[in-house]
Image (tube, coloured by chain):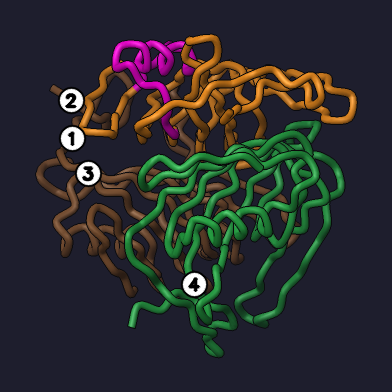
Chain colours: A brown, B orange, C green
Amino acid sequence: MQYQRFGNKVVARLDKGEEVLETIKSLCQKENIKLASVLGIGAVKNTELRYFNPETKQYHDQIFENSYEAAPISGNISRMNQEVYLHLHASLGGADFGSIAGHLKSAVVSATLECVLDIIEGGVEREFSGEVGLNLLNFK
Amino acid sequence: MQYQRFGNKVVARLDKGEEVLETIKSLCQKENIKLASVLGIGAVKNTELRYFNPETKQYHDQIFENSYEAAPISGNISRMNQEVYLHLHASLGGADFGSIAGHLKSAVVSATLECVLDIIEGGVEREFSGEVGLNLLNFK
Amino acid sequence: MQYQRFGNKVVARLDKGEEVLETIKSLCQKENIKLASVLGIGAVKNTELRYFNPETKQYHDQIFENSYEAAPISGNISRMNQEVYLHLHASLGGADFGSIAGHLKSAVVSATLECVLDIIEGGVEREFSGEVGLNLLNFK
């Protein structure tokens, strides 16, 4: 990864072989980013997408090994238990331009991934909601 | 909904059962937001997508009852006739990770929906264009 | 195209018949925008999408003539050889709401395209990487 901070924005280039979530988390730790939105385009492979069934509160995960164009990877950075918490979703286009989408559990950069982090001055913590079955943003 | 405003940003959590467009509109009314971009991830159900045919100027709407992962919901807030006007599109991933996309007419939060509004100081009004068949941003 | 600049944001309306990349590039030249993120929704036709195969470093392009809903067009503006360099990806919904996605090589606005440019004070140059086979952001 290479990146540069410009005030409340970070422009980052993630490189071939880097895992997307771990790499963005390490950037947030280095730059002490507590709250931000994330928008990224590029290409990823070995992508694990997650679908959450709100009725059963169960997950269904699937790995897509091939390289896909990220169009985009989007989401937010918050905190949970004082740690960086990254929540990303992805829309991905394949070799036939057909699209898949879901919660992004993990992915490896296959060519390059260009992300802009828009840092928000402040902080929001997450808390697990048994009712929903997810770690929700909590503004209390 | 819970939300917090941080300067020109609003981070919002829409909750299970809330209709997406009405809830974001009510937030804009409370916070007097006239112009903004919107980016949201989460999960929605009973989603009504719209496809506009530019040649016939006719709409085609379809309801998707199941829960889909929003990846993302994106668009903008402007004004029309002094009222909040929300224009959103959605890319949505289903239980099989197949993706659908279109103009977002309405949707109900099925798990959580996390939105960042990036407020722009200023205002843009919309006006109906008979030529295009849509309410267009109008900068005059 | 009509547009208005509000501080570090530009709200733009691209019009029927305008080519997306050329029109945004001309906006960047007029406003001397060197670095920005881009988010756009609307509808486009005659869209040329590109898929990059990282292993062979070869492209595969395909034209989609029909009108699709952009959900969204996203990416960034940087510089290469002192010229505006626009890197966009697109997720697009068709008449049956099925979605396609990829690198956006070109597209013509079919109804309207509403873009928000979030200008970043600073600059990043691109350089061709023979190793990756792409023009990468370069922070040196």
Q: Decide: few, some or many residues near mark 3? Use Cα within 10 Å; few <14, some 14-19, many ≥20.
A: many
Tell me: residue A140, above or below residue C78.
above
Give, as a three-letter code, the residue at label 4: Arg
Provide the residue designation for mark 1.
A124
Q: Are marks 4 and 1 in contact (CB under 8 Å)?
A: no
Q: Nearer the viewer, residue A3 or C59?
A: A3
Q: Label 1's element?
A: loop
**Do the dots labelled 3 and 1 sit on one chain?**
yes
Q: Which residue is mark 2?
A: A139
Magenta highlight range: B14-37
CA separation, marks 1 and 2? 6 Å
Mark yes or no: residue B116 visible: no
Q: CA distance from mark 3 to mark 1?
A: 7 Å
Q: Residue at x 27, y 45 (%)?
A: A36
Residue under numbered circle 3: A35
Crowd band around label 4 with a 10 angstrom C-alpha radius: few (<14), some (14–19), many (20+): some
Position of residue B48 relative to residue B102, above or below, is above
The amino acid type found where label 1 is placed reads Val
- The reply to whether dot 2 and dot 3 touch (C-beta < 8 Å) is no
Mark seen at residue C79:
4
Q: How far apart, in angstroms, are the residues tagged by discs 2 and 3? A: 12 Å
Image point 39% across, 43% down: which residue? A75
Which subunit holds the residue at mark 3?
A
Disc 3 vs disc 1: Cβ atoms closer than 8 Å?
yes
Asked where in the image residue B89 lies, by quadrant, the reply is: top right
